[in-house]
Image (cartoon, rainbow, N blue to C red):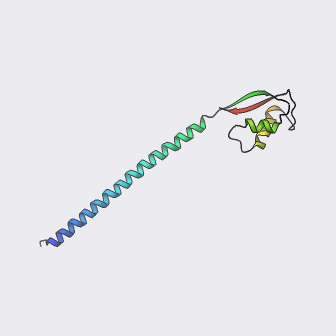
Amino acid sequence: MKKTNEEKRRSAAKHKTQKRTRRIAAGFFVILCVCLTFSTFFVYAHENRAETAYTYYKSVEIQPGDTLWDIAEDTMPSGYDSTAVYVEVLKDMNGLTTDNIQAGQNLIIAYSN
């Protein structure tokens, strides 16, 4: 049984459509792989930057008019949720039981690079 010209044309068109569909699917797959590779790289690079942040400590002399809250607002390193949290950290680091500080006192503060 021989195929007619019409059947041959339909078969060729079907084959061409299947081939085009495979090429499109392969293209999408390649694009997906490239996107996943780059997104993984950027997430990894971002995570590494966060790990290199260091906290340093220094002593500052309290000046007339300074308050613990003002010093906390001016020197609070990243990573603290609020000034109130950092004020409590400063109080703990310096052995303070209240927010009261006096000019001439030295206060240990944390800062980031």
Q: Quadrant of the N terminus?
A: bottom left
Q: Quadrant of residue 24?
A: bottom left
Residue drawn at (52%, 41%), measured in percent from left and top?
44
| Image coords of residue 100 (percent x, y) | 87, 36
From the top left corner, tell me how far across and down residue 52 is, in percent: 60, 34
Horizontal relation, residue 111 to residue 69: left or right = left
- In the drawing, does residue 51 fall left or right of residue 57? left
Residue 105 vertical position relative to residue 26 in the rendered view, above or below: above
Task: Report whether 43 appears left or right of 89.
Answer: left
Quarter residue 14 falls in: bottom left
Q: Is residue 8 above or below residue 36?
A: below
- The C terminus lies in quadrant: top right
Q: In the picture, residue 71 is in which quadrant?
A: top right
The residue depicted at 74 percent of the width and 36 percent of the height is 74
Q: Residue at x 73, y 33 (%)?
A: 110
Residue 68 versus residue 61 in the image, above or below: below
* Figure label count: 0
Residue 82: give x, y in percent of width and height: 74, 44
Please identify the residue farthest to the left as the structure is shown.
2
Of 102 and 35, the residue lying toward us: 102
Q: Position of residue 54 (x, y in %)?
A: 65, 32
